[in-house]
Amino acid sequence: MVNILLDGYNLDSDWLYDELKKYLKPEYKVAVVAFSFRDSRVKNNSDWQLLYGKEQGNFYGGIIGSLCSYGIKEENITFLNYFEDTKETAKNKIQNADIIYFLGGLPDRMMDRLKKFGLIDVLTQHNKVVIGYSAGAVIQFEEYFLTPDDDYPTFNYYKGIPYLKDFYLVVHYENTKEQNESIDKVLKERRKTVYVIYKGKGAVVIKNNNVKTIGNVKVIL
């Protein structure tokens, strides 16, 4: 299994391409999990379409274009739509995919919606490639933590999808007091390594439990 942890949805960046082309094959099918949106921004399918829809979605072109740069065909890329999919259609999309792609946003709300659709077990059984940026990266951990910010006023631990268990991850690192205090807290309480991806250019790739860092990543023991 391969887990790809990113800071942003820059899959086709020059500094990533040579590494990721080992895992993103032209014949692969992709299920894009677009469940991490804010409730205040997306209240219905029309709102969802403005973000991820093919005709007018702000993020659709960037997501599709980055995947197609590896030779993956657009017709082999499907989005999980919280407002249109049923539990069964969402499950089928996951089961038919070689690559699961978790988008950024709010990881705890993404988990809530995945649970509502009954997808945790089928996602856990997936053993090919999992990609995620920002929220989609941290959700790949059995347990993750979030530093206080505008969306999350207090530090807390959260339950994710149990692909990864041996370390913790920080995305969008900017060496702030709040981030460093959160990292220190985790080191003391959990006694596990923390991988820190600096904002802008960094990635972590885990293949069969072997961890490789790319770009601006710091490992804190």
Image: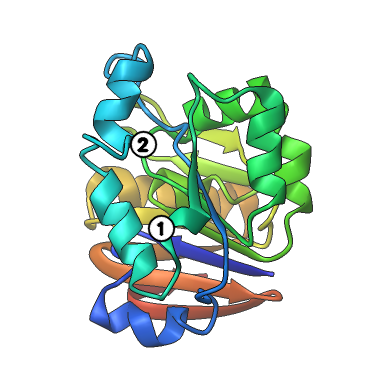
For residue 201, what is the image quadrant? bottom left
- The residue sitting at 48% across, 19% down in the picture is 83
Amino acid type of the residue tagged 1 in the rendering: Glu
Q: Is residue 184 visible?
A: no
The answer to whether the residue labelled 2 contacts the one labelled 1, judged by CB atoms less than 8 Å apart, is no
- Assign a secondary structure to mark 2: loop
Label 2 is placed on what type of residue?
Gly
**Mark 1 = which residue?**
74
Q: Which residue is mark 2?
A: 105
In which quadrant of the rendered image does the N terminus lie? bottom right
User: Percent from the top left, x then y, of residue 33?
Assistant: 50, 41
Which residue: 60% across, 47% down?
189
Residue 10: horizontal and vertical position, in percent?
A: 28, 64
Residue 59 lies, with reference to residue 169, above or below; the image says above
**Front position in the image: 28 or 129:** 28
Label 1: state its secondary structure.
Answer: helix
Q: Residues within 10 Å of mark 2 (few under 14, many from 20)?
A: some
Task: Of the two numbered discs 2 and 1 on the same chain, state the one appearing first in sequence.
Answer: 1
Residue 27 location, quadrant: bottom right
